[in-house]
């Protein structure tokens, strides 16, 4: 267990529970608004991740509480190279972010992770803090949006290919197509199917039409996209987009992207967004179809050292 945090006088810490998801969302939303001018996080994002069968919320999290009992900062690290943390902007410059970064490093060391990191907006206070603590940049990522008056140019599918909403019978194929594609460049373990179900199918607010697929001549899934609608229904975010390796360079991804954003707009969305990072090589594709970069993030990381 990591050592107790060095916190400002009167502040306390404890492991979090699923019941804290709303409070964590409020902290992250305030942090996002202060650093990017927009709020993207929703409670469904937290719940979907924390309800994974592989995620043990208590050991994987820590919350920092003000003397009033209000949550003002949090961090999570559950294994793998990715962590997350946030501090409410009203409590910046009090050493809480430094303490949480130290907790993440200690937790990752306990888990035997050779490297641990998190995404932060480029040039933000969080980015500058982690840089000052010696965290290095592993890759960049971008949030892109399609202008409201634009559409993705429709690509005709090859003969005998079709695009449609996924059925429950497709789900395992969708998971395999996405995992196979992402593991070509992502340094992590394969996501268990049960975890995928928890974050996608069982995500609060998810609808069957949110998963879009392209099927090949044999009827099998050859490309897949996962669409997340915001709680107010105004934005459709493509959280995953993948084409099977033997089916690339046929325009399937562009056709699927056009279909996904079209489905979002048909259900009331006025914004269409996605994110990608420098490991994928996909940025140029999205720029070519008319998407625009809205924000740039960096993945800052450190190499944990075990305590003697």
Image (cartoon, grey):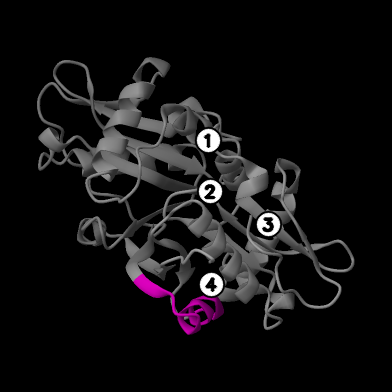
**Judging from the image, what secondary structure is the residue with disc 1 in?**
loop
- Tell me, yes or no, whether the two marked residues, 1 and 3, touch with CB atoms within 8 Å: no
- Does 156 sit above or below residue 104? above
**Judging from the image, what secondary structure is the residue with disc 3 in?**
strand
| Chain-order first, disc 2 or disc 4 | 4
Q: Between marks 1 and 2, how big is the CA–CA gap?
A: 9 Å
Name the mark on residue 78.
2
Binning the other alpha carbons within 10 Å of mark 4 as few (below 14), some (14 to 19) or many (20 upward) gives some
Span of residues in magenta: 124-137
Identity of the residue drawn at 9% across and 25% down: 159
Name the mark on residue 54.
1
Identity of the residue drawn at 57% across and 72% down: 37
- Does 31 sit above or below residue 146? below
Front tag of 1 and 4:
1
Identity of the residue drawn at 36% across and 64% down: 141
| Chain-order first, disc 1 or disc 3 | 1
* Horizontal relation, residue 220 to residue 104: left or right: left
């Amino acid at each position: 267990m990591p050592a107790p945090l060095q916190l400002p006088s009167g502040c306390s810490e404890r492991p979090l529970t699923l019941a804290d998801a709303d409070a964590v969302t409020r902290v992250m939303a305030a942090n996002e608004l202060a650093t990017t001018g927009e709020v993207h996080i929703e409670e469904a994002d937290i719940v979907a991740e924390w309800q994974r069968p592989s995620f043990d919320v208590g050991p994987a999290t820590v919350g920092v509480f003000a003397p009033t009992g209000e949550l003002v900062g949090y961090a999570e690290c559950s294994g793998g190279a990715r962590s997350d943390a946030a501090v409410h902007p009203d409590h910046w410059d009090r050493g809480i972010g430094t303490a949480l970064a130290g907790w993440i490093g200690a937790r990752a060391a306990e888990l035997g992770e050779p490297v641990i990191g998190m995404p932060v907006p480029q040039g933000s206070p969080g980015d500058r803090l982690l840089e000052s603590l010696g965290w290095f940049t592993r890759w960049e990522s971008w949030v892109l949006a399609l202008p409201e008056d634009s559409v993705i140019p429709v690509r005709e599918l090859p003969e005998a290919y079709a695009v449609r909403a996924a059925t429950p019978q497709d789900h395992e194929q969708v998971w395999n197509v996405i995992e196979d594609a992402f593991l070509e460049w992502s340094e992590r373990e394969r996501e268990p199917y049960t975890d995928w179900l928890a974050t996608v199918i069982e995500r609060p607010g998810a609808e069957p039409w949110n998963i879009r697929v392209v099927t090949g001549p044999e009827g099998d899934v050859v490309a897949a996209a996962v669409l997340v609608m915001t709680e107010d229904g105004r934005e459709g975010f493509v959280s995953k987009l993948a084409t099977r390796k033997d089916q690339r360079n046929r325009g399937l991804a562009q056709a699927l992207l056009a279909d996904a954003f079209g489905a979002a707009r048909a259900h009331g969305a006025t914004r269409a967004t996605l994110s990608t990072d420098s490991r994928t090589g996909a940025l140029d594709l999205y720029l070519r179809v008319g998407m625009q970069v809205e924000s740039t993030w960096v993945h800052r990381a450190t190499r944990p050292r075990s305590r003697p």
